Structures are given as structure tokens and as C-alpha cells.
């Protein structure tokens, strides 16, 4: 089974040429994130991912986890590997120096996160959720809670979880039942949460659960939900750990993939009630939790990219070794990488991975601008863009990951279907990504409802305008990219028509947004992926004018890959557009009893 090697050259290309690290370096807060330092971080992260976390990927899949005496037992080697992760300082990369963080851009942390997720998707969920909990506490908790908890979470000594789901409250959190009762300077929580990722383990000293619960007099629905911090071990005033809180892992789920990630039923308050601290204001908890959920949505999008990259590496390496049949231009029997259809599959994988990476990293750079730019109009532009693109990063990228992971099996034929080859694990692991942290349908409803209809299409118009501004660059790059230009701008026009159709038809038919949502989201992802690929082609053609001989192949490949995307992937946007604008009759016309 092949090892994971971080695609550093591709990552650096996106970080520097498309996501514009140099622009972030102009912000005072990131002045120390120099090219050299960022490069060292990438090299070291790649080594760590390859040497320490990647070898545990199969171990975790085969051993899985179990719950014994209300405690989660992890696969062999995970505790030591987590310790090395903490000692390496990796948990603190992007967080504020106020809490002991290193203060690097989220863009840099996103690339590192991709490496860790590729190396071990199930393991990397733990730091991903901790990062979201840190952001939510930083944004909404009292100063006292921040001082008490954040330094330990930023260092990785304590981890975080997200406790939303209950048996009756999955996509619909308005029906959360877990109860919180005031008790002096804190609250007591009683209730059961299900499917809690990394809900328990013994590799960190403490676990900080962020829990949605309802106060006794809370209004019905989402307006009556509050957010609480519930530590596994209570924290004494001097910062030392005190008694065990009344929160325990009851059992674990046996699931299709990510076997090394504990997915547990958590009981809060089997005894006197779990001691909890309010985060933000009473009854305004869902809005606070959205800070964590948005972080996790982008994080899960990056998981899609990461598992796709890993599946691609395995398929590519197999295709270069497996001999089968004859191919035009090849003497004797050929390795399958020479067959045009195998190339088609590998290029479908490679081109979409590159498109996803560019979309995700560009969005990460916008996050840095939104939080750290001195320019209010830039902050507002970046905030609007992140809001628009986040459901696409989560929804489109995780759907594309299904295709890429499936092709990873297909390229290897029967070998791919056999567990030992490794492709099957990526295929199984990828399957959760379109489900947790809001299903594809829920992401798409967010896009069409809140992000397009909610602002009358303004953020979408701004994006369309920015995409069209690439025209001048494509023209300046010369005739070689003219073909790309025609294909890209036809798809941009089509996206504008879909958004206009939605805005026009949604007011007359309440079923229109739901019927159009996923197709419109997939259309948008496919088109912004195409835009990023065209940007990559422009950057590569500029580089070709002055690069060293040994770099020429890399930049040539960028242009060919962009062309492949435009010719083989971008046409899908038209099918999505047609389905998105078909109206709701055919979707809803068959009575439910006939389904
Ligand atoms: C491995 C794993 C890990 C998880 N980790 C966590 C965690 O750490 N913390 C946590 O709180 N939860 C976690 N979850 C729960 C996860 O977030 C939910 O499973 C997910 O949000 C979907 O909810 P559900 O399973 O109840 O499905 P449902 O809500 O029942 O949805 C079923 C189907 O109906 C569709 N649907 C539902 N409502 C609508 C609607 N209004 N419009 C259109 N379509 C709709 C959905 O898109 C989906 O296709 C995890 C789940 C799993 C399996």
C-alpha cells in the first residue's frame, strides 16, 4: 500500500500564486509569516504526516475503537502520535499569541490540515473539532472562560467536541431537548447527545464539550437554545484539574468508515447533572455555535480534498505499475497509465483535486482578511465571500470527493475493491463527508436560502463580477488560453442566469429553492472550480516565461490540467443548470405514497 506524500509543489503553487500569501504578509499580524518560515512549516508538516500519522491510517481502520467502563479505547499508537503532534506545536499554528498560539495565517493552517487529513482522516477530526471549539470560545465566551480554557486547548493539552445531535434533532436543531438548569454561578445539564465525534478518549488531559441545551423557561425552537461549555474534568481556580464531571461515553457506533474516530453516545447528567458554563447569552446559543459549525464546514470540505488526494496518489501509483493490454505508441505490453480511459479517470481526479484546493485555500485567505485586515471594506468583502462560498466548500467538495474516491477504486480494477489495496478504505472513509456537519442538502439550502435569496443575489453578483475580471488576464496571457476563456465565461454567464432564475421564481413557488438547491450548488462549485483552474493557467503561463528548465513540466501540466477541467468537468455545469432551473413540478409531482 502506497505511503502518503504531501503534494508540496502543488500546495505552494496555490498558496503563493492563487491564494496570495504575499498579500496576507502585508498585514501586520502576519508579518512574521515569511516565505522561508512557511516553507519550513510545510516541509516539517509533510514529514510528520508521512512518518507519524499516515502509518496509523490502516491500523486505525482495522482496530477501530471500543468503549470499556464508559471510556473510549483508541487503536495502538494513537496516544503516542497525538503526543508527538502536541510536542511539535502543531495544534497552536493558527491561533492567537494571546493564548499561546503561533499566529500563522489560516491559509497556512489549511494546507497543514490538508496534510494531516490526507495522512489520517479519522485522527485529524480531533484537532479539527478542537480548532472550531477554540474559535467559538474566542468569539463568544467570557474573558474568564477564555483565560481558563483557551491556552490549554491551543496547546493541544485539552481537546474539544461539538455536541449538537440528539435522536430527534439531526438536521433540525430546533427540537434539541437537552436541559440546562441554573445552579449558582454555573448550570447543570441533563440529556443525551448522539454521534459525538471524539466525545471521549484518554490521549488529552481534558475534553471540553460545547453543548447545545435548553433552559427551563426557554422559548420553543431555535430561539430557545443556549450554548454551554462542559469540561470532562472540572477546572480548579488555580487552573489544575479537579473532579470528574458528570459526563460519560455510553457506547460507540459501528460504522462504514473513519473507524479510528470515536463516534459516541454521550450522557450528560446521569447523576446530579453535568456542571456547565454559559457561552454567550442565554437563548442565543445557536448563533454562537455557528462559529464552530462554519469552521467545521470548511474543515470537512478540506477533508474531502484530502481524502481525494490520498485516493489519487494510490490510483496513480498503481496505474504506473500495473501492466495490462497494449496501448498506441507503447512497445510491448503497456502499464495501464498509457490507456486513454485510465488517463481520463486520473485526470478527472487530478483536475478536480486542484480545483478544490484552489477554492478552499482562496477561501482560507479570505478568512484571514476578514479577521485581520485594517481595511473595513476589505473585511466586509471577505466576510460576504466566505458566507457565500462556505456551503459550496462543504457541499460541492465533499460530493466531488465521493467521485474521486470511487474512481480511486475503479482505476485499480479488482485490486481496488480488495481491502488490502487501501482504496476501499478511502472510499468508505469519504462517505461520511457529505453527511456530518450538515448534509449536502442542508448546505445547498443554506446557499440558496440565506446566501443567494437572503441578500437578493448581491454576494453572487460580486463573485460573478470578480470572475469576469479574469478576462483581461486571460487575454494578456495570449492566444494559448483563448479556448479556456470561451468555455469559462459561457459557464459564468450560465451561473448568472441560474441565480436570476432562482430570484425570479422562488417567490411564486415555495418548493423552488429546495428543488433547485443541490443542482445550483453543484453548478456553482463546478464553475468556481473552473475559474480557479483558469487563474492557475494564467499564473502558470506567466511563470513559464521565466522559470528554470526543470520547472517547465510542472507549469505546462498546470495549463493542460486546466484545459482538461474546462473540457471534461466544466460541461457538467450545464446539466446542473438545466436541472436547477427545471422548476419543482417533476421533483414534487409524484405523490409521496408512490415513492
Ligand atoms: C460519523 C458521524 C459523526 C458525527 N459527529 C457529530 C458530532 O461530532 N457532533 C454532532 O453534534 N453530530 C455529529 N454527527 C451527526 C450528524 O451531524 C448528523 O447525522 C447530520 O447532521 C444529519 O442528521 P441526521 O443523521 O439526523 O439525518 P436527518 O436530519 O434525518 O436527514 C436525513 C436526510 O433528510 C434530509 N433532510 C433533513 N432535513 C431536511 C430539510 N429541511 N430539507 C431538505 N432535506 C432535509 C437530509 O439532507 C438527509 O439526506 C455525526 C454523525 C456521524 C454519522
Image (cartoon, rainbow, N blue to C red):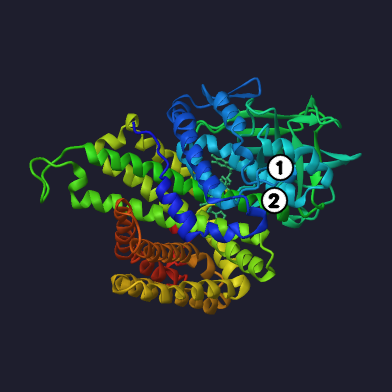
Q: Is mark 1 on a helix, strand or loop?
A: strand
Categorize mark 1 by other alpha carbons within 10 Å: few (<14), some (14-19), many (20+). Answer: many
Q: Is residue 435 visible?
A: no
Residue at the left extreme, as displayed: 332
Residue sitting at x 68%, y 48% = 135
Left or right of 176, for residue 25: left
Mark-to-mark CA distance, 1 and 2: 8 Å
Q: Is residue 161 visible?
A: yes
Q: Where is residue 520 in the image (x, y as percent from the top left)?
A: 47, 66
Disc 1: which residue: 210
Q: Which mark is residue 289?
A: 2
Left or right of 566, for residue 357: right
Q: Residue 100 carries which label?
A: none
State whether label 2 is within 8 Å of ligand 1. Answer: no
- Vertical placement of residue 518 versus 497, above or below: above
Q: Where is residue 583 in the image (x, y as percent from the top left)?
A: 46, 72
Q: Nearer the viewer, residue 182 or 59?
A: 59
Contact flag, marks 1 and 2 (Cβ < 8 Å): yes
Residue at the right extreme, as displayed: 184
Quadrant of the snapshot with the N terminus: top left
Categorize mark 2 by other alpha carbons within 10 Å: few (<14), some (14-19), many (20+). Answer: many
Residue sitting at x 8%, y 44% = 331
Quarter of the figure with residue 506: bottom right
Residue at the bottom extreme, as displayed: 504
Quadrant of the snapshot with the C terminus: bottom left
Dot 1 or dot 2, earlier in sequence? 1
Amino acid at each position: 500500500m502506497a505511503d502518503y506524500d504531501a503534494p508540496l509543489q502543488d500546495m505552494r503553487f496555490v498558496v503563493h500564486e492563487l491564494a496570495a500569501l504575499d498579500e496576507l504578509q502585508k498585514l501586520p499580524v502576519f508579518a512574521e509569516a515569511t516565505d522561508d518560515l512557511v516553507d519550513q512549516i510545510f516541509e516539517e508538516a509533510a514529514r510528520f504526516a508521512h512518518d507519524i500519522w499516515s502509518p496509523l491510517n490502516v491500523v486505525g481502520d482495522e482496530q477501530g475503537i471500543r468503549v470499556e467502563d464508559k471510556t473510549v479505547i483508541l487503536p495502538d499508537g494513537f496516544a503516542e502520535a497525538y503526543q508527538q503532534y502536541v510536542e511539535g506545536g502543531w495544534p497552536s499554528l493558527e491561533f492567537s499569541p494571546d493564548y499561546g498560539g503561533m499566529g500563522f495565517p489560516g491559509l497556512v493552517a489549511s494546507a497543514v490540515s490538508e496534510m494531516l487529513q490526507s495522512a489520517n482522516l479519522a485522527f485529524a477530526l480531533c484537532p479539527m473539532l478542537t480548532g472550531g471549539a477554540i474559535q467559538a470560545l474566542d468569539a463568544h465566551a467570557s474573558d474568564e472562560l477564555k483565560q481558563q480554557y483557551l491556552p490549554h486547548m491551543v496547546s493541544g493539552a485539552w481537546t474539544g467536541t461539538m455536541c449538537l445531535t440528539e435522536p430527534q434533532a439531526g438536521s433540525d436543531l430546533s427540537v434539541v431537548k437537552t436541559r440546562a438548569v441554573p445552579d449558582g454561578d454555573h448550570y447543570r445539564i441533563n440529556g443525551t447527545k448522539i454521534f459525538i465525534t471524539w466525545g471521549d478518549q484518554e490521549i488529552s488531559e481534558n475534553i471540553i464539550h460545547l453543548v447545545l441545551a435548553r433552559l427551563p423557561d426557554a422559548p420553543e425552537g431555535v430561539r430557545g437554545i443556549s450554548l454551554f461549555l462542559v469540561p470532562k474534568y472540572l477546572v480548579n481556580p488555580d487552573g489544575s484539574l479537579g473532579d470528574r464531571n458528570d459526563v460519560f461515553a455510553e457506547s460507540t457506533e459501528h460504522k462504514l468508515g473513519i473507524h479510528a474516530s470515536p463516534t459516541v453516545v454521550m450522557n450528560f447528567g446521569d447523576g446530579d447533572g453535568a456542571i456547565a458554563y454559559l457561552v454567550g447569552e442565554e437563548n442565543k446559543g445557536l448563533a454562537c455555535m455557528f462559529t464552530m459549525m462554519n469552521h467545521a464546514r470548511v474543515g470537512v470540505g478540506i477533508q474531502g480534498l484530502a481524502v481525494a488526494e490520498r485516493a489519487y496518489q494510490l490510483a496513480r501509483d498503481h496505474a504506473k505499475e500495473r501492466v495490462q493490454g497494449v496501448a498506441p505508441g507503447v512497445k510491448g505490453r503497456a502499464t495501464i497509465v498509457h490507456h486513454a480511459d485510465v488517463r481520463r479517470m486520473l485526470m478527472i481526479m487530478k483536475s478536480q483535486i486542484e480545483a478544490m484546493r484552489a477554492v478552499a485555500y482562496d477561501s482560507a485567505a479570505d478568512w484571514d482578511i476578514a479577521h485581520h485586515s485594517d481595511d473595513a471594506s476589505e473585511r466586509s468583502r471577505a466576510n460576504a465571500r466566505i458566507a457565500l462560498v462556505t456551503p459550496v466548500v462543504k457541499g460541492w467538495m465533499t460530493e466531488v470527493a465521493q467521485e474521486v474516491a470511487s474512481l480511486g477504486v475503479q482505476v485499480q480494477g479488482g485490486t481496488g475493491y480488495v481491502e488490502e489495496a487501501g482504496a476501499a478504505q478511502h472510499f468508505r472513509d469519504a462517505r461520511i463527508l457529505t453527511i456530518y456537519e450538515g448534509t449536502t442538502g442542508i448546505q445547498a439550502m443554506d446557499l440558496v436560502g440565506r446566501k443567494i435569496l437572503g441578500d437578493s443575489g448581491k454576494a453572487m453578483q460580486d463573485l460573478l463580477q470578480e470572475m469576469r475580471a479574469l478576462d483581461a488576464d486571460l487575454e494578456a496571457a495570449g492566444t494559448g488560453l483563448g479556448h479556456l476563456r470561451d468555455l469559462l465565461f459561457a459557464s459564468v454567464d450560465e451561473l448568472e442566469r441560474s441565480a436570476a432564475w432562482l430570484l425570479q421564481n422562488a417567490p411564486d413557488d415555495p418548493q423552488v429553492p429546495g428543488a433547485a438547491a443541490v443542482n445550483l450548488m453543484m453548478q456553482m462549485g463546478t464553475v468556481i472550480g473552473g475559474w480557479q483552474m483558469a487563474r492557475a493557467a494564467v499564473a502558470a503561463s506567466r511563470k513559464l516565461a521565466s522559470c528554470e528548465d526543470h520547472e517547465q513540466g510542472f507549469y505546462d501540466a498546470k495549463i493542460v490540467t486546466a484545459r482538461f477541467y474546462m473540457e471534461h468537468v466544466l460541461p457538467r455545469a450545464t446539466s446542473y443548470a438545466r436541472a436547477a432551473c427545471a422548476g419543482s413540478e417533476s421533483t414534487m409531482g409524484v405523490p409521496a405514497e408512490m415513492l
